[in-house]
Every structure is written in structure tokens, then in C-alpha cells.
Image (cartoon, rainbow, N blue to C red):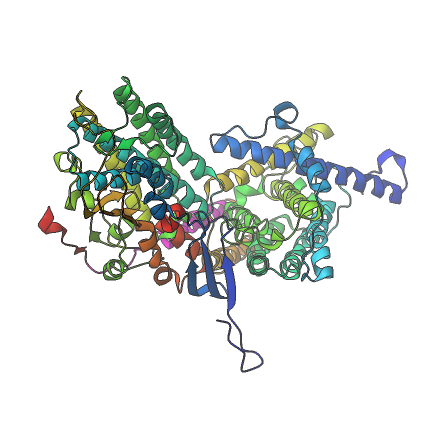
Amino acid sequence: MVTESAHEFETRDLLLNVGPQHPSTHGVFRMVMQVDGEVVRDVIPYVGYLHRGAEKLCETMDYRQGIGFMDRTEYLASMNAELSYVMAVEAIADLQVPDRAQWIRMILVELNRISSHLMFMGAFGVDAGIIGTPMIYGWREREAIIDLFEEITGDRMMFAYFRPGGLAWDVPTNFAARVQEVIAAVKQGIKDLDGLLTYNEVFLARTQGIGVISAADAIDFGMSGPSIRASGVHLDIRRDEPYLKYSEIDWNVITATEGDVFARYNCRLQEMWESVRMVEQCLDRLEPGLIMPEKMPRMLRTPPGEVYVRTEAPRGEYGIYLVSKGGNRPYRLKVRSACLSNLQALKQMSVGQYVADAILVLGSIDIVLGEVDR
Amino acid sequence: MPTHLLGLNTWLDGLVRVLLVVLLMTVTAMLLIWAERKLLGRFQARIGPQRTGPFGLLQSVADALKLIGKEDLRPRNADAWTFELGPYLVFVPIFLGFVVQPFMAGFHIRMLDLGILYFVAVSSVSIVGWVMAGWGSDNRYAMLGGLRSAAQSISYELPFVLSLLSVALLAGSLNIDDIVVGQAGVPNIVWQPLAFMIFFIAALAELNRAPFDIPVGESEVVGGPFVEYSGIRWSMFFLGEYAGLFITGVFVSAMFLGGYAWPFGLQLGIGFQLLLTALKASLLIFLVIWIRGSMPRLRIDQLMGYSWKVLLPLALAQVVVNGFVLVYGLPRIVLTIVGLAGVVFLVWVTERAVRRPRVPRPAAVALGSEAAS
């Protein structure tokens, strides 16, 4: 990287090691930046600091025990991660999920999407340089959502609430009222964050026009989620391959055309409003009923086969590739991580930018290291 | 000449004043740290420090004690002299700037005839300390931060000085006390709104406060020049920062808001004058903290460009306008009108710079989605 100087006054690029302990790497991510003054010339990302072998561990556990591991991969949107996993198991075991369980799943998944995006807003605002304010604003409403999840599932982050076939137990009787409360709080919270960030001149100046990635490049890198939609690619698994009840309610896929950091930020912001709309519609359709199929075996055994199921997690396509050779545990489990694929584009987006912008670009991909490294 | 305190001779009198000011300064810096944490807490829907003493007032004392107790580390590869001297060069010049601050009529350490020049000269010395700290730490983040600090301070020094110059032109003096006394009727902000804005912005940059805090940018260079410092040396940077904040508050209120003289004239009692200065300074400090709680950080090119392309020409124009008004004896209301127009122009330029149209990317691509939906 650092070239030997041929002349006395030739300048050499500086290797700047960012992470694994750096306030803006959102966990234990490390990248080595080659900087020329303040301009980034090269970025080498290093992942794997948080590798815990979740996939391999799942192969040693029965199907229900695997749910907990999925929580721990995508720890900011555990419901979405669980959903992919239980849907994969349901697909391979050919289980029919009752309607009520599907509606509840949808509400929880969308609420978790909001909470994850709120976390993004907070962290991104701090990356942009506001000292803590957006973080606390984001946390305030995320707290309301997490409180609700705690009332339902008994846990605040690692819910382990979905089961192959349905839900672990039914929601409390005041569920609808509580969700309404949370939604009201969230609406105010999104407005606050919108006012704090989107209408701030410095924020606009910092985020617009940097870290641009074209639609073609984004597709080539296998990006997904809001990160690719911001580049103008209409890709949303909820619409393209409807699962749960997404085809029965009215909502829009949010896209932008610029493909810069601000577009990625704005897509997430608008997505939160869509999620709010979805949750409200789901609440109207929620009816009493079963939460698990009537005939559920005590120990779930699956026929041999393989399946790939993907869902739209807050960060993009969270896919589960599951191979079964019969019995009560997966033969092979592979998580297709949205963050890992999105991270591939980091170099493309940040080379030629300023160091400060490279940090924002990394923030705008919204990685969760648990999911990158699994 | 100011009267001597306690009837002492000149040297003892000076010593007493210095001691008073140093004590006052340390206590004020501690209070400011507390105020900033409390205010930021409120801006962020938190409570802020509350466990140490009434309303958490002793938080800074606790922090200071903790910092004194910490080990004073020096990286093995650090340049020993530069590293160890850096903090002193940051905070000593800031304390020196105190010499000419007018708190009330007759109380300052020494009122120099070239007060403004002295203040500007002394306060820019601390850049050297920042660069020394950044270079001496042998840390790449620190070096980036130190260089950023140098670039920023040098660029913003110019609009800073030019806007001071326009005030000095109006008062016809470089003596801070004269300028304050001259504002007994109408404060300078009325005549020089543009200079006030430029000065305030440049002062934010000089102080390395948000949105100009790129030398210490927590999310980029992780504290910049003081990333390697610990214990008492680190607390010196902090002391310097908050003392600088306080001094700037006092200085701006003296230059533009009429200091102790406006709006009650010079006949006010000494205590009330002090209160008035403190009130005006607190108002400005509150504004600075508020900005810190809500403004993202600028990028280095935007920061430099804003100084050289926007602030500097406008500050120069203000000096020229002042010259015309003074030479041709035009009514002072012209200054107000031109200044307000300048402020509008400044805001417009800033707005334009931000909301430039973004280059749209190639048309949207549908990824097998239209068929599916």
C-alpha cells in the first residue's frame, strides 16, 4: 500500500486503520483506509470479529432452538430474522400458519422494522456529527416499541417468539390498544427526527451527492433493501414474492433515484411511514383465532429436502437456506445476510470521498455486525 | 487608569487581579462543563448529571478529581517534548486572553490600548498547541486532527479579525474598554449585524465548536489531537476549551452587545455591570451549546470554502462600507441597512450552497418486479 518514495518530496498515502474499536463502525467492523490528505484512495474492509458460528450451531440443535440463534445474528431486528427462519422451517415441514398468527407476525415485524430504522436514524445522525441528540430521539421511540415487545415476548432484544407453525403464545388482551399507543408515539418520533435531520442545512450539505452508487452497480454487488432502492431499483421482496399477508394490504415501495447517502437515509425515513400504515391496517384485520396449527407434533421433524426462503428485513434480503435430511434438526443452515452483501459496495462508494464522508457512507449502509459475521 | 485594588502597589495589585481571574476562570470552566452537560441533556430528552451535589453541580469537581487520579500516559513513540508541552500551549494563551476582558468598568487585569490586537494575537497561539499535540502523539487520528485544526483556525482567523476591524473602525479605537464605553447608547450589533454574524460564526470555528468541530470530530478522528492524552493533561484541553468558550462569550458581548455599558449606561453599580456582562455572555454560550446539540459537523472542504468564499469577502465588504460611511460622514443608519442586506445575502448564499440540485442518476431499473406485481 505505502509505496517507497522515488523522489525526496514525493508524498506517501497514509494508512488509516478504522476500527474494530472506533465509535463509527457500528460494532466490531474494521476497515483500513488509504488516505491522501483527507481523500480516501482505497478501502479494505475486514469482517469476522463477531463470528460466532451461528449457522453451524443451528445444525446441532433442533428446530426450535435455532430460533434463538437467528435473534442473535440480526440483533436490531430480531423479529425479521426469526421470521425468515421459521418460514424456512415451515416451508420444509409443510406447515400452514393460522391467519391470526400471520397478522400478529406482520405487526411485530413491521414494528421491529421501525425500531431498527429509528436506531439507524440515531446512529447516522451521530455519524454526521450531532452530539447524541438524534441517538436519544431515536432511542426514545425505540424504547416504546421494545417495551411493547417485552410485554408480549418477555424479552427486549432476543425475543424467540415466533415458532415454526405460528407463535409461542398469544399476545396479551390489550395488544391492540398498546400497539395504537406505540404507533402514536412513533409517529411523533419520526416527525421529530425528520425535523432534526432532514431540514438541517448542514445535514443536507453533508449527505447529498456523496457515496453515489448507480443502479447497475448496486445490482452487481447484490445489494438489497433500502440501500438498493435508494439507487432506483424497484426491489422489495414483500411485494415481489408476497409472504405473510403483504399482498392483502395497501402500501408502497419507497424508492429514490439519486443513490447517494441522503437518498438511502430518506428511503428509510419514508419506509417508517409505510410501516406505520401497514401496522394500522394489520390491526384492523386482526381477529381472534388460533395461533398455531391444530395438529402440531411435540417434536418437529422434517422430511428430507432443501429450501431457500427470503424475507425483506430492515436491511434488505434476509434469506435462509435450509437443507434437511430428515430428523429434528437442520443438516445445513446458511444465512444470506443483507448487510454482508451491502457492505461489498463500501469500497465502490467511498473511494474518492473525504474521510468524513466515508464514515457517513458506512453509516448509510446501516450494517449490523452480528448479521455480517453471524 | 483603573484604580488600584485594596490600595496596593502596582505589582501586588496586578498579582491579586491575576489570582482572582485564574480562580474565577477555573470555577467558570467547571460551571460551564456542568451547564453544557445539563443543557445538552435537556435538548436530548435526558436529565443530565444529578447525583453529585445539588442538581449535579459537583459533577465537574468529581470529574476533575477522577482525572487527577488517572495515570498520565505517554505513548512510547510519542515525541516527548511536543507531546508534553502541547496542552500548555493550548490553554495558556486562552488564559492570557483574559487580561483584556472587560467585565465591568475599571476591572480588568490591564486595559491595553491595542487590546483587540493583543487578544487576536494571543488567542491564535493555541493553534500551535493543537498541532504540537497532534504531531507529538504519533497517532494518525491525532495528526489528522491537528492538521485540520491548523487549517481551520488559520482560515477563520481572517474573517474573525476583519469583523473585529469593522467594529474598531466605528469606535475609532483598538482599546476594548473604549469600544464598550462607546456602545453606551446603541450596541454595535445594531450598526454591524453582518459583522456580528461573521464574527460569531468565526468564533465558533476558532473554538472548535459544532458545526466546526472537525478537529475533534468524535465520529471521524475520535477526539483528534487529544486521542492519546489522559489524566491531567487531557483535562487541560478541556479546561482550555471551556475557558475559551467563556472568554469568547464575554468578548462578543463586549464587542457587539454593549458589554457592561448597554442598556443601563455607565452609571450602573459595579455588581450590576458584572451581572450584565455575565448575562450577555451566558446568552451567547447558551446559543453555542444549543447549536452543538442540533448541528451536524461540516466537512473540511465545505468548512474551508465557507470561510474563504463566503465569510471573507463579506467581512472585507463590511470593512469597505464602514470606511465609506466614516470618510464621507454618511448617517449611521446606512450601516444598519447595508448590514441587514448583507445578513440576508449571507443566509441566501448559505442556503444556495446547500440546496444545489443533485445530479440525478441513470433511470430506475426494475429487477423483475413489474412482472411479479
- Outermost residue toward the front in this view: A327
**Which quadrant does the N terminus of chain B fall into?**
top right
Direction from residue B370 to residue A271 in the image, left or right? right
In the rendered image, residue B244, in percent from the top left (x then y), is placed at 64, 45
- On screen, residue B70 versus residue B11, left or right, reads left
Q: Out of A256 and A307, give the one closest to the viewer.
A: A307
Q: Main secondary structure of the magenta part?
A: helix
What x and y, as percent, mark residue A38?
A: 49, 63
Instruction: Tell me the quarter of the picture where residue A188 sits.
Output: top left
Residue B160 vertical placement versus B294 (above, below): below
What range of the chain is rendered magenta?
B334-363
Q: Residue furthest left?
A: B371
Q: Considering depth in this image, is B322 or A308 the residue closer to the camera? A: A308
Relative side of A43 to B221, left or right: left
Residue A184 in the image: state x and y as whole percent: 30, 26
Q: Is residue A239 magenta?
A: no
Instruction: Give the total of numbered labels.
Output: 0
Task: Tell me the residue at 37%/31% (across/down).
Answer: A141
Q: Residue B132 appears at what percent x and percent y? A: 66, 60
